[in-house]
Image (cartoon, rainbow, N blue to C red):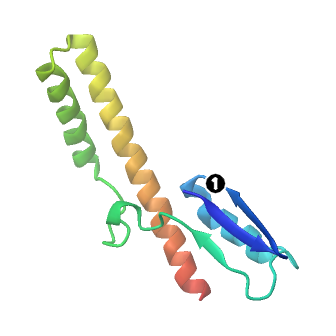
Amino acid sequence: AFFGLRARGVAATTPPPRARYGAVLDALLDAPGLLAENALLVFDNTLWKGRVAEGQTGLTAAEEDAAGAAGRKRAVADGADADGADAAEKRARKAARRDRAIAQALHEFNVKLRKDT
């Protein structure tokens, strides 16, 4: 996702992490004279896989556990040994936690946008 900024006739793109969109918005709006009148700010991927639009903020702990178990099961089915299955489960849990954190951050960003309009 890229953050697009058009300020004082200069276009710039920088990829801030999605979890920092709210902080970026605050910094841009709070800096006097940074944005030209009628400036356009574009934040991509704020509905993140439709989850934020549906009001979901990621997986529950039980769903994270299920994702980990599913990762282990896939690894075993693919012929992984015990260490490989453990690693696959760990990766699946980590991905599920990351998904939850991103969805929560984007939900909070969208709430902030609604309040600012």
Q: Quadrant of residue 36?
A: bottom right
* Quadrant location, the C terminus: bottom right
* Quadrant location, the N terminus: bottom right
Taking the spot 37% from the left edge, 40% from the top edge, the residue there is 95
Farthest right residue?
33
Q: Left of 63 or right of it: where is 50?
A: right
Q: Between residues 26 and 39, which one lies in front from this camera angle?
A: 39
- Residue 28: image location, x then y, percent: 75, 71
Q: Between residues 44 and 21, which one lies in front from this camera angle?
A: 44
Q: Left of 73 or right of it: where is 40?
A: right
Q: Left of 15 or right of it: where is 109?
A: left
Local packing at callout 1 (Cα closer than 10 Å; few below 14, some 14-19, many 20+) is some
- Residue 70: image location, x then y, percent: 17, 35
Taking the spot 46% from the left edge, 54% from the top edge, the residue there is 102
Q: Left of 81 or right of it: where is 56?
A: right
Give the vertical position of 61 relative to 23 (above or below).
above
- The amino acid pointed to by label 1 is Pro
Q: Which residue is mark 1?
A: 16
Taking the spot 48% from the left edge, 64% from the top edge, the residue there is 106
SS at mark 1?
loop
Give the vertical position of 86 relative to 117 (above or below).
above
Taking the spot 66% from the left edge, 66% from the top edge, the residue there is 4
- Residue 57: image location, x then y, percent: 37, 62
Total labels drawn: 1
- Residue 110: image location, x then y, percent: 50, 74
Give the vertical position of 87 relative to 35 (above or below).
above
